[in-house]
Image (cartoon, coloured by chain):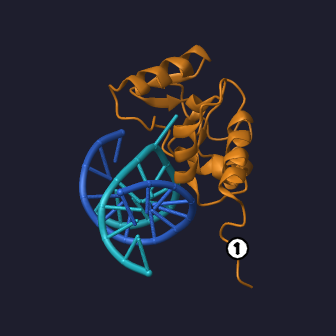
Chain colours: A orange, B cyan, C blue
Amino acid sequence: MPRKPNPETPDERRRLIVAAVRAIPAGDVAGYGEVARRAGLPGRARLVAKVLCAADEPGLAWHRVLRSDGRVAFPAGTPAFEEQVQRLRAEGVRVDAGRVRGQRAAPTLDEMLWAPPGAPKPPHRR
DNA sequence: ACGATGACAATGC
DNA sequence: TGCATTGCCATCG
């Protein structure tokens, strides 16, 4: 059956995405793709970026959203980049050279199931 | 309608 | 890890 690509209105999508971002607990992070999926909009990672860019929602934790590789999306050195890094560190997130440590930016279902507490432990680096 | 663009993702070397 | 390539999706001129 023909799948429906975008049954939602632009505003609806914006709302869903903002909600998904709000759902990220402090001190934790998520990838754009992850947020998109949690928002019920799989494959729309770029839309998430768009929304965050235009999001003027006060208190929105946009800084907890990273690329799938755990890196900050802004080019290093830019004001936005620096601010994001600081905000993350302020929440106890270890950021090294624009890369987040200690957590997975885009944990897959497999990963969650296959990496229960006590599994392959990546050595802490700091 | 079409091509360019972007706070992206997955894959390959 | 880093860089290049390809795929994706919504927006905009």
Q: Is residue A102 left or right of residue A78?
A: right
Q: Is residue B10 above or below residue B7?
A: below
State the residue at coordinates (62%, 17%): A91
Q: Is residue A33 above or below residue A76?
A: below
Q: Is residue A122 above or below residue A49?
A: above
Binning the other alpha carbons within 10 Å of mark 1 as few (below 14), some (14 to 19) or many (20 upward) gives few
How far across and down, in percent of the image, does residue A18 sit? 68, 40
State the residue at coordinates (70%, 73%): A4
Q: Amino acid at mark 1?
A: Lys
State the residue at coordinates (43%, 26%): A80
| Residue sticking out furthest to the bottom | A1
State the residue at coordinates (72%, 29%): A25
One can see residue A98 in this view? yes
Q: How many marks?
A: 1
> Which residue is more in the foreground, A20 or B5?
B5
How far across and down, in percent of the image, does residue A21 sit? 68, 38
One can see residue A108 in this view? no
How far across and down, in percent of the image, does residue A9 sit? 70, 59
Q: Which residue is mark 1?
A: A4
How far across and down, in percent of the image, does residue A78 sit? 35, 26
